[in-house]
Image (spheres, rainbow, N blue to C red):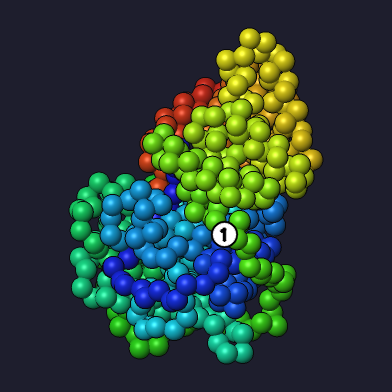
Amino acid sequence: MRFFLIFFFAFLNFSSPAHAAWHKASGEHFVIYANQSDKTIQLFAERLEVYHAAMALLIGRAPESPSPSNRVNVFVVRSQAGVRKLADLKTKYTAGIYLPNAGNIVTIVPRLRTGGSKFSLTPETVLRHEYAHHFLFNISNRAYPLWFQEGFAEFFASGRFERDGTIVLGGAANHRAYELAASRKVPIELLLDTAAYRKNKSGGYDQFYGRSWLLYHYLTFDEARRGQMTEYLKLLGKGTTEPDAAREAFGDLDQLDKDMDQYAKKKRISVFSIPPSKLKTTPVSTRRLSAAEAAIVPVMMESRTGVDEEEAKKVVADARGVAIKYPDNPAVLEALAEAEFDAGFDEQAIAAADKALALDPTRVRAQIQKIYAHARKAETADDETAAWKQVRRQVVAANRIENDHPIPLIQYYLSYRSSQNRPPQIAVDGLQRALELAPFDQSLRMILSAQYMEDKQYVAAAETLRPAAYNPHGGSLAAAAGKMLDLAMQAIEKQPVTDAIPAD
């Protein structure tokens, strides 16, 4: 299942620079692949790491440092059209996508560039916006209204770097100026009610993103409103509905709307300026990809953004073509293994993965494909017991390569579920750890919640389900989570008070 957040904006044309070699920049939290100069990709990777540190400083919380395979992978494509093609989206308003899946966190953006009009939406702003979503998902187990999610992302994405290295956050969202001036205004009652907004939203472009930024900025810096956003979030945390929480925390909503309009007319606004001396980041390394690695990047992007049956056939053909040209490159063979599995060829996936691992034993993604392929084979094996033991051996091998990779923990648990056996406690513990490593993965929340429901741990199930059930971007998964949450809450009402989460 493909789950992603999409960043919308008024259509802009970006010019593309001359052809450059493919480069890869690796930092503590990000990996960037771009067909651009090493200086450009190094600059943006370093800025992203500073951005992460600045957000952590302002919020006072930082996500757990990810394992190498659980970093955000940024793929830079030539244009917005390339973004839409990878996402299989028809809308012309898509500027970037964010796919938050355990062990496969992917962001797709157009070509990175500096300069340009202050009113244009730059790819760096898109990157910041998408990472702000990721950051929020990682530091909180809460479910937030749509306006808050987008206002938060816009607030932190709108900023700049000064020449001395100072990062400015909470700046004016100039790229929303046209939207706020010319698009259809979103009534305050709809802005503050996710369900009502979605129900009443037309197909046209409106001011939702701009008004969300404006409200977040206003509540953050206006002295008269100090503390209201904190109170609002507390009310939501207690289960108060979005409209009721807004009225109780903000007061008269019509007045709030008028105050926001006045705030938008200010010629100068407050910002957070953080000098480099207050921020600690780890070094970023950049290298030019080999010819083999560069040739397989398009296959990697297709596979990692998700393929359907027809797309899988094309991608595996492309991967095989590259592998014929570069038969002894571990990156090519690792990508080939994934393409073979997606296309339904389990034996070929295992063979390609084995070749990749023989050349480079650290290729955990190749080992992951072996887990997937052996698990699918086990479903129809004559000796199911032996087949599932083989799957668990592959899990152990992957865990040895990268101890904090969430996929082996998930697959170890699923190996028991798929074989119709109750998972042992160690498998359940592993699944809980996987969610700690990947709290942004809503499908993983559903799996763990189902286990809690079976074990009659209804409070734990409800707490785990809420972010998925209330996720404004969740679609059908959110609806399913909502139904399970209702069942959990009904069970809680029937239980003695003893079934409660102990106080910290």
**Which amino acid, mark 1?**
Ala
Q: Decide: is 420 above or below 102.
A: above
| Total labels drawn | 1
Can you name the residue that lies furthest to the front here? Answer: 325
Horizontally, is 499 left or right of 483 in the view? Answer: right
Residue 311 versus residue 317: which sits nearer the camera? Answer: 317
Q: Position of residue 119 (x, y in %)?
A: 34, 80
The answer to whether residue 494 shows anywhere in this view is: yes
The answer to which quarter of the image holds residue 256 is bottom left
The x and y percentages for residue 441 are 54, 43
Tell me where residue 51 sits by quadrant: bottom right
Residue 427 screen position, x and y as percent? 71, 28
Q: Name the foreground residue: 76 vs 405.
A: 76
Q: Residue furthest right?
A: 400
Q: Is residue 256 left or right of residue 349?
A: left
Instruction: Tell which of 80 and 472 is nearer to you.
Output: 80
Residue 152 visible, this orientation: no
Rendered residue at 45%/34% (across/down): 481
Is 425 left, or right, of 473 in this rendering?
right
**Image quarter of the N terminus:** top left
Residue drawn 62% across the image and 50% down it? 326
Q: Is residue 33 left or right of residue 171?
A: right
User: From the viewer's perspective, is residue 192 above or below residue 339?
Assistant: below
Front residue of 347/238: it is 347
Tell me residue 391's x, y (percent): 69, 26
Density class for disc 1 (Cα within 10 Å; few <14, some 14-19, many ≥20) is many
Choose top left, top right, bottom left or bottom right for residue 74: bottom right
In the image, is residue 431 above or below residue 180?
Answer: above
Q: Is residue 38 above or below residue 109?
A: below
Q: What residue would you read off at disc 1? A: 294
What is the secondary structure assignment of the residue under circle 1? helix
